[in-house]
Image (cartoon, rainbow, N blue to C red):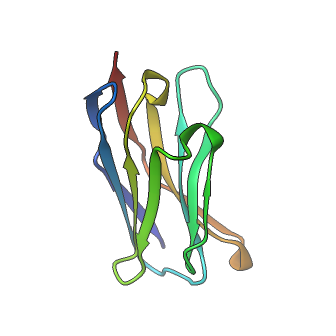
Amino acid sequence: QVQLVESGGGLVQAGGSLRLSCAASGSIFKPNIMGWYRQAPGQQRELVASITSAGTTTYADSVKGRFTISRDNGKNTVYLQMNTLKPEDAAVYYCNLQVPWRYLEVWGQGTLVTVSS
């Protein structure tokens, strides 16, 4: 069984930075895709960024140039460096692991990011 544990959320002023981490444990099949999604109150969950085992990245247009996703395959950990945060970035951020060839998808419990204006 795969578990994802997120850390790094918190309160930051607009223009500030935060770094989220997500450590995966258990039977980690590869190749896989790890990513970050977010959900603001009253909004649908949306993809923020994802990264494959090979390092290919995808970003939402709203975060391009401000957020950077990276991963350490040896530690089964994915990171999200968030810079120049805006109030509209405030949300619960969820870590996600997908193993398409095994029809497997796992979610973390979420970490809250609050951005004050």
Relative to 26, is 51 on the left or the right? Answer: right
Is 41 situated above or below 102?
above
Relative to 48, is 23 on the left or the right? Answer: left
Is 65 situated above or below 96?
above
Is 75 situated above or below 115?
below
Residue that appears at 42% across and 80% down: 73
Work out which quarter of the rendered image holds the C terminus and state it.
Answer: top left
Viewer-proximal residue, 101 or 51? 51
- Counting labels gives 0
Q: Quadrant of residue 3?
A: bottom left
Q: Quadrant of residue 53?
A: bottom right
Relative to 48, is 70 on the left or the right? Answer: left
Give percent across and percent down for residue 52.
59, 72
Viewer-proximal residue, 63 or 29? 63
Residue that appears at 45% across and 55% down: 68
Q: Quadrant of residue 82?
A: top left
Give percent across and percent down for residue 44.
65, 31
Give percent across and percent down for residue 65.
51, 47
Residue that appears at 60% across and 75% down: 32
Viewer-proximal residue, 72 or 94? 72
Residue that appears at 45% across and 42% down: 93
Residue sitting at the far top? 117
Residue sitting at the far front? 65
